[in-house]
Structures are given as C-alpha cells and as structure tokens.
Image: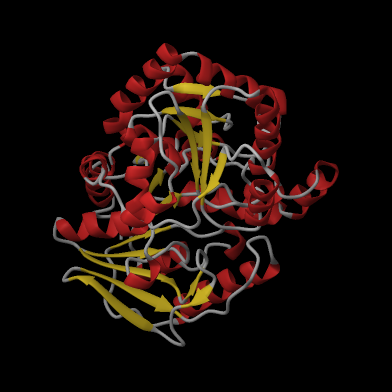
Amino acid sequence: MNIIIINPYGPIPIPEEKWREYRCTIIGNYLSSIGHNVTWYTSSFSHHFKNQRSSGWKDIVINENFKITLVPTPGYKKNISFGRIYRDLVFSYKLYQSKLVNKPDLVIYSESPLTFGYAGYKIAKREKVPAIFDQMDLWPELMVNSFPNKIKGLINALFYPVYRNRKNIYQDLDGFISLSTPYLELPLSFASNLRSRPHAVIYNGIDVEEFRRNIKPDKGLLALLPDKKDNDIWFTFAGTLGPSYDILNLLEVVNTIEKLQVGNVKFLIAGDGPLRSNVEEFIKNSKSGIVKYLGKLEPESLSYLYSMSDVGLSIYTEISNVEMPDKFYDYTAAGIAILNSLKGEVGSIIEKETAGLNYEPGNKESLLKGIIYLVNNNDKRDEFAQNSNRIGLMFDKNYQIKKLGPLIDTVMEANRHAF
C-alpha cells in the first residue's frame, strides 16, 4: 500500500540531526520493511533543533520504500508560543493544498487539534481512505497545563471549540494508537466509537539488544567522567535542562547532601537547555565536587554512561504531563534503578515491578529521602536494578512496533467496502 504519515514534529534520520530514533521513523522503517511505500510529511522547521532544514519542499530518501518530505513552514523560538501554533497551521494548510504524488491507501497522522483536522483527517476524507490517529501528546491539555491554576478554567473555556472538534474527529477515526495507556484511555472516555474500532498502545521503546551490545567506552566521555571507586554510587540525568524537569529541586537537595556528607555519591548531569547556567553555577560554588556536568552527549555515549551508573533520574516538575519518557526505556535497557517523579503510567510500572522509587515532584524532602534510601540500601538498590533489567525487553521497540501491522490489516479489512 501507499501509506502517508503526517506529523510536523520530531528529529529526522539525517547526519545533522543525530538523536534517538523518533516515533515516525520507527513506524516508517517498520512499514517499509514489510513492503509498504511510506512517505512521512513533516515540517521544514525542526521543533527539536529550532532550525530550518530546507527553504522549500524537499524529499529525503531513507530507503527504497520510505522517504521524508519536508513541507516549508516558518519557525519559532519558544515551545509555548503563538509562533509554534502558526507554524502548525501553515504546515497543515500547505500540505492539504498540495498535490500528493501518489494517492494514499491509508493515512497515519499525529497533529495538534488546534489545526481542526487539517491536514491528516481532512486528507483522509478527501482521498476517501482510512485514517489512524497516533496520540503522542495530550493537546490542548499540554498547553492548558502551562498556564497558572487560577486561569486554567478560562483557558479551557476558550478551547471549547477545539475540544468539541477533536471529539467529533475521534468519533470518526478508523483506528487509534498511542504511546501510553492514559493517552489511549482519555480519547476512549469521550469518543466511545473508538472502543469498537482497532486501537492499541504502542510504546516507543528502544532497540534493547542493540543498546546493550553497544556498551563500549567512549574516549570523549571517558575524559569527562570522574574515576569510580567500588563504593561510589552514581545518579545520572541526561536530557533537556528545561523548566519541565526538576533540576532546580535536585540542586537544592544536592546542596543538603553536601552538608550531610551522605555516602560516596556523585550526580552526573548531561544535556543542554535554559537551566544549564544554574547547573554550572552550582558546580562553580561547590567545594565537594559531587556534581559533574558532562555537556551535551552524543546518543552513542548514553549506553556506556548508563552502564556505569547506579540510578537513573526520571525527574520532572508538576507541569509535565509526560507519561512514558524515553529515559525510562534507557534505564530499563541499562538495568539500573530508577528514581522517578512522574505520577502516571511510568510511576505505576516502577512501583508494580519494583524497579525503583517514586517521589513527589518539586518536594525537596521527598527527593532527599529517596536519594538517601538508595545510597544506604545496597541490597534494595540491586533488587531495583535487577527488576529494571528484567522488564527492559517488554519495551523493546522491535516488539512494540509489530503491534501496528495487524492493527492496520484490521483497519483495511473493516474499510474494504466502505469507500
């Protein structure tokens, strides 16, 4: 079949954007590997790197059955901004107005409801083909949560037309997939028609065997890492140093740990973002040296870094609505204990599988208590690590993405005579 994927977000697999494999890339590679012709339409402006990839329409060939087409759009500087909304609107309008090279047999799309069904749903209706929505974020809930509590009611009211239109579209979808259970349960709660149509949770995951196979020392990373003694305990965070992460709370807690002289503990921080200056300032004023900033690492370096670590930090603030962070897949693939602040699905899995500890986001005492417990209880920390390693293969991307093939077959069979 000719399958088009529509999503203006995510890194694409080109040398200039070395990053973990994005969901649309995983889907495109899988569908093309089983014989479908796949085109992923995405934006010329990279949300992740905040730069333009091309000045106009551009095709990028990934393999003989999979290509990416860049749709020219404007850019923006801030994630929460009208510029971002405008970019999404331009993307949807231009794609809808364009002449598709090949008539699709199926549309798989993930777009903001703020575009009111353009381009994915509207293209599927125009071309009279089935549409499958991929729920990767809760919009507009994500935007509403960024506002102060006292005006969230007003913002929700302003988004009423968006909520209503989203419900109508979801009721009419032919299939539905999501990257976490809550991202599936919410649509099922207000779009009851979806319950009788093909739907599935397909976690992003990572290639666990490849991750574990690539645990090799990296010369650049080795030069940055401190020497690790037998009784040292490393807590590691790698990711965006932004306001959605509990970085400032972590630094306050580390300040207390320095004063208490808790064990032989080190905190390794990698990544970049607006809170980088806070991390560097803390290190500058610290005498103990228990915090080490590693800069922005290449993805290949993460396997070794996590293999050397004892605890992976999944630390988010209350404003985050992330359900299944990619960090969780990394930590379980590496088989290390997890200290987590997310209350959703990942928090439930960590508790159920005894793979680590959960703490209250932004709560200094809760985070401090969790760190001290993990430092002082070697046997329990080892148990967490063993369980983390055990469940790693449950979230292997190669296992997860294979759920999509049968779902598509069911969608196509159900619609064989519909159009």
Which residue is farthest left?
35
Give x and y (percent) for residue 163: 64, 50
Give x and y (percent) for residue 130: 34, 57
In the figure, is residue 249 to the left or right of 177?
right
Figure check: 417 above or below 356: below
Residue 100 figure quarter: bottom left
Asked if residue 122 shows in the view, the reply is: yes
What coloring was used for the rendering?
secondary structure
Report the label total. Answer: 0
In the figure, is residue 277 to the left or right of 96?
right
Which residue is farthest right?
150
Please report the residue visible at 23 percent of the width from the left and 44 percent of the height from the top.
398
- In this rendered view, identify the residue nearer to me: 299 or 256: 256
In the figure, is residue 196 to the left or right of 256?
left
Which residue is farthest bottom?
55
Please report the residue visible at 85 percent of the width from the left and 42 percent of the height from the top.
150
- In this rendered view, identify the residue nearer to me: 406 or 244: 244
What is the quadrant of the N terminus in the image? bottom left
Asked if residue 185 shows in the view, the reply is: no
Figure check: 66 above or below 280: below
Give x and y (percent) for residue 95: 45, 76
Give x and y (percent) for residue 14: 32, 70
Figure check: 345 above or below 120: above
- In this rendered view, identify the residue nearer to me: 370 or 290: 290
Please report the residue visible at 37 percent of the width from the left and 40 percent of the height from the top.
203
What is the quadrant of the C terminus in the image? bottom left
